[in-house]
């Protein structure tokens, strides 16, 4: 199984790693059936050669799996250079990365990756709350995630940061919302997106839900959490904000800060009229 962001639907997928080097997040089942390894460079370059024989025009490339950015800068630069050589028409190369992957690279290395064609790094921040990050075994602190995103943006690469609504459950949703809103304000990403928590077999959090140790938010509570999050976002540079994933109860699209009030108004309207919300049957990851 290969995973990629929704926005990479039309990208050529090049598998750099197998699985996720961290693979401990309690809410995630994506890579639990894989043993992490880095593919040999020869295999990767051979895949790129093969793709060139199949596709006459490739404008977008996405490097898989969970955190292909864990490779050394030298290896990544070799891969990026080979992609640009084989696909000179390619306009962007994007990748999943963890905060740890970013912080292990120097500012100069990140800038070199930008110059070599890396346009965007997708980072799953999940929450701005250190308690939530610890509870879900994210493997990074609030401070580390903020620093990683700042380094990405300073290097000229766009950061697309994902958060998960409902990740703190009924007990901690207010702290999760407020701390996530202020985190977005501090890190200033190019893109910020909200998914809504869905539990799947294989994810440790699923067992906590079944046992009653973790209580999921209702659709209305998710909207209240989202509104509280947005109220605490204060930005002085543009940020594309999306909450239109298949898992979300209500689709939100806007640019911060200018569309903040418009999105808050829509949330208030949906909380008053629950008929606007997506039925559970149609939610998906």
Image (spheres, grey):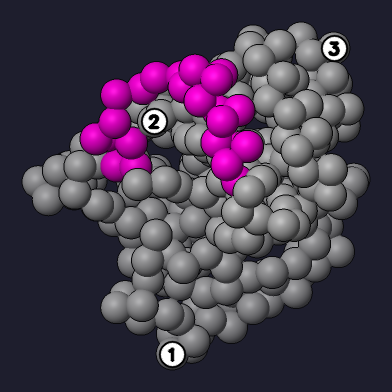
In the rendered image, residue 255 lying in the magenta stretch gets the answer no
In the rendered image, residue 38 lying in the magenta stretch gets the answer yes
Q: Secondary structure at mark 1?
A: helix
Q: Residue at x 9, y 46 (%)?
A: 211
Query: What span is colored magenta in the figure?
Result: 29-51
Query: Where, quadrant-wise, is the C terminus in this rendering?
Result: bottom left
Left or right side of 103 for 273: left
The residue labelled by disc 1 is 275
Residue 120 visible within the image: no
Q: CA distance from mark 2 to mark 1?
A: 39 Å
Is 13 situated above or below 228?
above
Q: CA distance from mark 2 to mark 3?
A: 27 Å
Q: Nearer the viewer, mark 3 or mark 1?
A: 3
The residue labelled by disc 2 is 19
Left or right side of 217 for 262: right
The mark nearer the N terminus, 2 or 3, is: 2
Q: Residue at x 55, y 51 (%)?
A: 5
Badges 2 and 3: C-beta atoms under 8 Å apart? Answer: no
Is 176 situated above or below 56?
above
């Amino acid at each position: 199984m290969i995973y990629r962001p929704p926005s990479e639907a039309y990208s050529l997928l090049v598998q750099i790693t197998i699985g996720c080097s961290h693979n401990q997040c309690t809410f995630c089942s994506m890579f639990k059936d894989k043993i992490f390894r880095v593919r040999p460079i020869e295999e990767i370059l051979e895949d790129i050669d093969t793709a060139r024989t199949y596709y006459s025009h490739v404008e977008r490339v996405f490097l898989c799996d969970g955190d292909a950015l864990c490779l050394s800068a030298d290896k990544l630069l070799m891969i990026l250079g080979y992609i640009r050589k084989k696909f000179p028409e390619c306009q962007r190369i994007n990748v999943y990365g963890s905060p740890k992957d970013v912080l292990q690279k120097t500012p100069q290395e990140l800038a070199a990756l930008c110059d070599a064609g890396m346009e965007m790094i997708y980072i799953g921040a999940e929450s701005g709350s250190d308690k939530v990050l610890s509870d879900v075994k994210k493997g990074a602190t609030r401070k580390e995630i903020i620093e990683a995103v700042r380094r990405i943006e300073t290097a000229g690469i766009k950061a697309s940061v994902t958060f998960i609504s409902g990740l703190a459950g009924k007990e901690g949703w207010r702290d999760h919302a407020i701390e996530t809103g202020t985190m977005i304000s501090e890190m200033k990403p190019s893109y910020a997106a909200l998914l809504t928590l869905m539990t799947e077999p294989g994810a440790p959090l699923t067992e906590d839900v079944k046992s009653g140790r973790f209580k999921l938010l209702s659709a209305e509570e998710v909207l209240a959490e989202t509104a509280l999050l947005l109220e605490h976002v204060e930005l002085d540079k543009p940020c594309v904000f999306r909450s239109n994933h298949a898992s979300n109860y209500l689709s939100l699209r806007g640019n911060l800060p200018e569309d903040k009030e418009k999105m808050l108004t829509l949330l208030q309207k949906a909380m008053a009229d629950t008929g606007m919300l997506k039925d559970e049957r149609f939610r998906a990851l």
